[in-house]
Amino acid sequence: METVNWNDLPSLALHQVFTYLSPKSRVSASSTCKHWRTALYHPLFWHSLYLDISLSGSSFTEVKSKVKHTNKNLATLVRDFHLTFDSRSTQCFELASTVIKALMDNQLLRNIDIKLGHCEVSKNKIFQDSSIQLCTYRWSIQNYFEFAILNVVQKGNIEGFSFGYFMFYYWNVLIHMLAKYSCHSLQRLELAGLGPSIFNEESKTICFNSTFDSMSSLTNLKKLSLDLNSNTCKLLPALCSMTLLEILVLHVHKELDIEISDDIWADVKKYCPKLELRLTIINCHTVAKYLHTKLLRPSMPLTHLKVLFCKMMNVQVLHKLLDYRNTLQSLIWVDDQSMNPGSLLKGQQLDPSAGEDTNPLIILSWVCSKLAELVILGYLIEPVDVCGIARLRGPNLKVFELLEEDICFKQPRSIIYDEIVTDVSSWMNTNWKPINMNNLLVSHSNYIVKCISKDLTI
């Protein structure tokens, strides 16, 4: 009988065997010999790669070794690349830059997702050290980082790109590159940030016409997220060419100096019939105060509204949302603490002479037939209104979050609390309880990330 040497097993057969193994078992099997180790590094087994560059729980030497291995053996094999790194660390930023540079030799790359492992809303907390020298150096690193990304994008055939929670300073150049090399393949583009840029994006010289033309050429986009500012709002008419667009996410961090007409939204709605608009206002009191007059328009295909840490409840916005009775699916309004002294009904924002006798959230729950998510944190609400909302929406209300501390219990807490939990659970057909303050994330940034992380999912 002929002796079979497993070391001489044909690569094609070995690849077939490896397909039946889990990733962990495949790595273990690859330690058998050099031939089997080589077989491990085949694009068939590296469709997606998740790389986290952080010094939390690991030494710099360990992280550097992991990155070196990725750059040498894996960077050219992956189709979908997901990178998370801590931008506060200069060392992590530098290592992340080397990974992006290694991707330049990848001809298979289709999706690039880059996120920061640490996010802050405040400009002053982006970097741990506030010294001018370090900030200047890190800015130079980000320049290098972004130019490396632009070079990778020039390879073409990119299907999805995400630069989450951090301002891509050369966003207009990125759009040009994607339009030039991936206009027919690009289906997902995520550029919306967590907060305003630490640099002045308005000061940049932008060739508007060419950026508009580039944006218009991305006709196969299905999902798009942008920071809405004085530059990007001028690009909204370009959406009319994206007839396949399904989700548009807009983040607003500061007051806009121009208004968007209802005619623009009417055209967008006409040419993008499947479009869902998901609007998020972050840490901006002025925008929240005038949201109903300066930003919301009747023709908006608004399905999701988030107002996060803007330090006010604008009840007039709740009334304005009745314009979206056939589309609104989610309302999230969150602040630090109960700043409304009575309730949403009796709060200081309501005009006593208006004769209000019903909580606007009750009306919203009654009229908006598709409302499936309601999160109101930091504003007092009467127990009867809690039950009324649950009764009106019933099992169609999939998410209903209130702070336990925000519910105005007038009777002994143990009695009324149990009654509310029982009634709401019964109407929603689920086990419901209000959230305890101690169970909330402490950081504004972490909560915001939690809220917006699923914005591009259908």
Image (tube, rainbow, N blue to C red):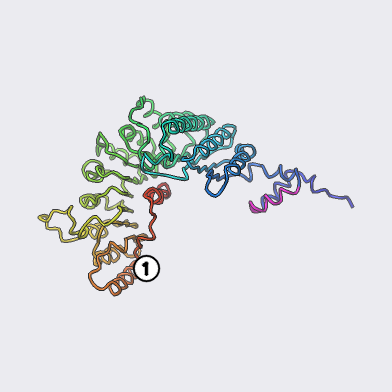
Look at 75% across and 43% down and name the residue there: 35
Asked whether 253 or 67 is in front, the reply is 67
Classify residue 223 as left or right of residue 294: right
Residue 387 in picture, x, y percent from top left: 27, 67
Residue 383 in picture, x, y percent from top left: 25, 67
Q: Residues within 10 Å of mark 1 (few under 14, many from 20)?
A: some
All told, the count of numbered labels is 1
Residue 102 in picture, x, y percent from top left: 58, 34
| Magenta stretch holds residue 23 | yes
The amino acid type of the residue labelled 1 equals Asn
391 vs 127: above or below: below
417 vs 318: above or below: below
Q: In which quarter of the image is residue 410?
A: bottom left
201 vs 266: above or below: above
Q: SS class of the residue under badge 1?
A: loop
Q: Quadrant of residue 370?
A: bottom left
Classify residue 39 as left or right of residue 457: right
Residue 34 in picture, x, y percent from top left: 75, 43
- Residue to which mark 1 is pinned: 429
* Residues in magenta, as a range: 21-32
Classify residue 80 as left or right of residue 134: right
Asked whether 129 or 325 is in front, the reply is 129
